[in-house]
Image (cartoon, rainbow, N blue to C red):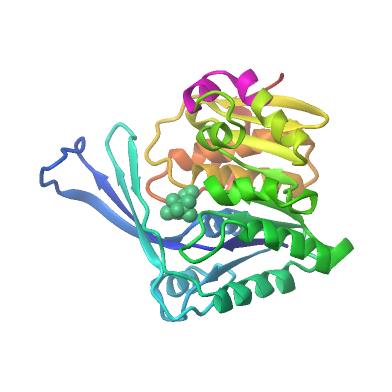
Amino acid sequence: MIITLTANPSLDRTVELAAPLVRGGVQRAASPTRQAAGKGVNVSRVLAVSGLATLAILPGDPDDQVPVRLRLDGLPHLAVPIGADLRSNITLTEPDGTTTKINEPGPALSPERQEQLASAVVEKADGASWLVLAGSLPPGVPAGFYAALTARVRAELGGRAPRIAGDGSGVPLRALFAGGPEAVPDLLKPNAEELAELTGRHDEAALEADPSRAAAAAKLLLEDGAGAVLATLGSKGAVLATRAGSWFATHAPVTARSTVGAGDSSLAGYLLAHSRGAAAPGCLRQAVAHGAAAAALPGTTLPALNQTTPDAVVVTAL
Ligand SMILES: O=P(O)(O)OC[C@@]1(O)O[C@H](CO)[C@@H](O)[C@@H]1O
């Protein structure tokens, strides 16, 4: 069982433009779609569609659009009521695959709601194989929320605690490394921008352009205690750094329609392969195959295992 926590879920609204975006103009949308989403929800969706047992934990009232859609979609989830509407995030895609995203802050979570969410996670994580802590934190939630939860899960569950993966950006990820060794995740999944921000090593473009630089930056996070770092590098592929070695993987070119959810799909691909006993290069291969398949799909549409092409991925040791 893989548990995901999305502290700040969203209703993702995607507008596919039939022509390039004209700022200040009026344009007609080709096909608007709405999907219950957020980083952890997306990871759970990819796992579920490929047959892995998963539970998505999130805040949300029973009649909110996000839990309502999750029920209709049949995705196993646990929504902790918060008495407020969840956010709606907007994605604009252009014909050349350019993806523009506008994310709302989300509703504030009171300390009482935060505790309800955290205790639901501790209860459900008991005996799970992985716990994924993913996405931004809504207003009112302290930056150290994921770090404190990681340490609490390990302290309360001891040997029954799952491995913990962190996926997201900015302050909550940095806090994982500031919270002492017991808060550092087993797996971290930054993109190039997040890796640059976390390590202060190079800028995003330099890391995307040069896998060895990305691996060197990822190794700094291993020195800080992370078990493994899966750094996604957009259309270039991804780097996996572990104590046993580092690898770079790249996929044959795909025509991108929307990159939303590509990173979440990569993480899910990694977890799928890991759950099936694959070694590190095999986990990286499936991560990149899932990321590429997601980029070729519209909006926040996410791929099943049989829509991915791991044979089109080349993995090299660094
Ligand atoms: O604002 P956050 O929590 O960082 O990211 C939220 C989000 O952009 O992440 C997913 C894609 O990774 C989308 O489904 C969702 O809208």
At horizontal 67% and vertical 50% (from top left) the residue drawn is 176
Work out whether residue 248 can be spotted: no
45 sits left or right of 85 in the view: right
Residue 212 forms part of the magenta stretch: yes
Q: Quadrant of the C terminus?
A: top right
Residue 185 at x, y = what percent?
72, 49
Work out whether residue 54 can be spotted: yes
**Which stretch is magenta?**
204-215
Residue 60 at x, y = what percent?
48, 74
Q: Residue furthest right?
A: 159
Q: Quadrant of the N terminus?
A: bottom right
At horizontal 83% and vertical 29% (from top left) the residue drawn is 244
286 sits left or right of 302 in the view: right
* Quadrant in the rendering for residue 160: bottom right
284 sits left or right of 260 in the view: right
* Quadrant in the rendering for residue 187: top right
Residue 210 forms part of the magenta stretch: yes
Number of numbered discs on residues: 0
Q: Main secondary structure of the magenta part?
A: helix
Q: Nearer the viewer, residue 95 or 109?
A: 109
Q: Is residue 306 above or below residue 285?
A: below
* Quadrant in the rendering for residue 284: top right
Residue 65 at x, y = what percent?
39, 72
Residue 184 at x, y = what percent?
73, 48
Q: Nearer the viewer, residue 4 or 113?
A: 113
Q: Is residue 108 above or below residue 164?
A: below
